[in-house]
Amino acid sequence: MFKLTRFLKGYRIKTVFGPFFKLIEAVFELITPLVVAWVIDTAIPMGQAGDYSGLIYGGLIILGLGVLGLAFALTAQFFASRASLGFGTNLRKELYEHINTFSYAELDKFSTTSLITRLTTDVNQAQQAVAMFIRLILRAPFITVGAIVMAMIVNLKLSLIFVISALIIGAALWLITSLSMPKYKEVQGRLDDVSRLTRENLAGARVVRAFGAEEREKKNFDTASEKLSSSSIKVGAISAVLNPLTYAVLNLAVIAILYFGGKTVYYGDLTQGKIIALVNYMTQILNAMVVFANLLITFTKASASAARINEVFAVTTSMKEGTGATPDFNQPAVKMENVSFRYASSSVDSLEHITLTALKGQSVGVLGGTGSGKTTLVSLISRLYDATEGYVSIFGNDVKDYNNAELRKIFGVVPQKAVLFNGTVRENMLWGDQNASDEDILSALETAQAKDFVLEKKGGLDFVVEQDGKNLSGGQRQRLTIARALVAKPEILILDDSSSALDFATDAKLRKALGVLREERGLTTVTVSQRATSVMHCDIIVVLDDGKIVGTGTHDELMESSEVYREIFRSQNKEDK
């Protein structure tokens, strides 16, 4: 948790003044029992004798202490709220920005749901701890120690009851905190599992129903929920002991004060007002200890959350940004030499000894079955991952030499899953280029075969796309994501199986329109597909099988030389017939 205190920068004055005002309020609270004792022992007898001035002054002093204490408490609450909200905002913002620096390799280490939980639940837990820290971290121990000191001033012998009670409760706090801290981290991990299953089942609800897997997924969710419940019950059981134990010890202490104090009053060594003062101080200790116990529980939870947040901050991107390079458009658009790649979680290479050259303006097709390494190959070209071995160059420069801004200008990447954002069609298209005009957008839509259906929609470019494009068909979503990439006017366009939902006629029109762009401005296209007809017209076709290139050439050349290509092409043509 201490590592996260840097996010309080800019709120240090509030962090200091919050506890300070709480201490002043605590001083007023500690004085009040002495005033009450004076009223009981002095002012009331004066009133019985007909002099009510003591009661009036005593009442005004108690009222004044209460009002001042409230004012200082509200001021402290204001400072604590501002500081904790600022802390949470700064932490959440920097954590989000840090996650955005991750390459795919780092994102693979954390699940999406885990990162979401850390950005929301864990940050909120840390923010709540900061708010309680500012308000109570000094007040609770100050009240405890102050009440013991004041009790010593009232009666030294009876104050030993306070000391013994505080020591017993302190030992209990330490033991319970030590036992519960590891459990809270386990609970957060279980919460990740429940969030992941919830997200998967909501996102894939149609698939679950299509396969009749409702009962199976319900069992999986129930299992994860039961594990979360079990972990929460265990840690709750440990924490639940604290408050009853605190109340029990302090109530026994009050009984002891009344018993021994009553004897002292009987023998005339102590007044009734001072006994009431001692009981009030014990009550203050009781309340302070309960608050301190809850504070420790909150801090235990926050420590577990802070550890999970720091795990994310501890991970730095393995892909260092290049210092900058100038593309030489006379050099090959893509050149891969003896490239191999292995995922961090795997013990075998996903790609082995890949060698490939594509000139500017050429069309490259990448064909292969599921799991053959097609997506991995194009991810290395656009530097979503770095090659484990070998060399990847783009327009004459090592891909690692380009900075991120330069790379994103060179590449337009259309992923397998068509991702659209809630907003208008225009707003989605402007992701490609924030300065694009409507004319640029319509041109890109026309090339992507999306112009007609967009203009038919109510509002045209102002038609509102729902989250994930749920109000569009699969083919429409794919065409819009292709158009979005074209708006950026990239030098290299990567289509990662991004026309799978298009019918053959639309797919053919799209290939023809991209061919016009290749001729007009030398656009290089890399098309990944499982359909041979989608890549058969490419200048170069790369056939992958189990991470290896088993054929390279044109359609005619591969029909002669590659058995894998012939089998794919003939099997798909039979299906088409």
Image (tube, helix red, strand yellow):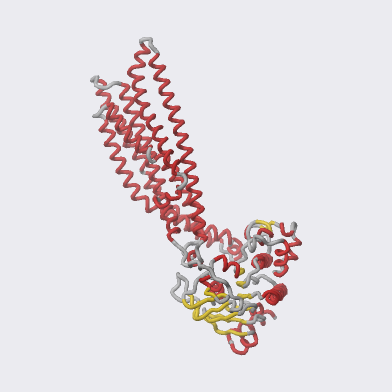
Instruction: Give x and y (percent) for residue 170.
Output: 31, 42
| Residue positioned 60% across, 72% down in the render | 496
Q: Quadrant of residue 495?
A: bottom right
Of 119 and 94, nearer the camera is 94
Q: How many marks?
A: 0
Residue 271 falls left or right of residue 546: left
Of 355 and 309, nearer the camera is 355
Of 288 and 234, nearer the camera is 288
Instruction: Give x and y (percent) for residue 107.
Output: 49, 64
Above-or-below relation of 165 to 397: above
Instruction: Give x and y (percent) for residue 172.
Output: 31, 43
| Residue positioned 27% across, 33% down in the render | 161
User: Is residue 231 at least partly visible in the picture?
Assistant: no
Above-or-below relation of 62 to 244: above
User: Is residue 453 at least partly visible in the picture?
Assistant: yes
User: Where is the C terminus found, in terms of image quarters?
Assistant: bottom right
Of 407 and 561, nearer the camera is 407
| Residue positioned 44% across, 62% down in the render | 315
Instruction: Give x and y (percent) for residue 185.
Output: 41, 54
Above-or-below relation of 530 to 454: below
Q: Residue furthest bottom?
A: 560
Residue 567 falls left or right of residue 426: left
Q: Quadrant of residue 525?
A: bottom right
Q: Quadrant of residue 326?
A: bottom right
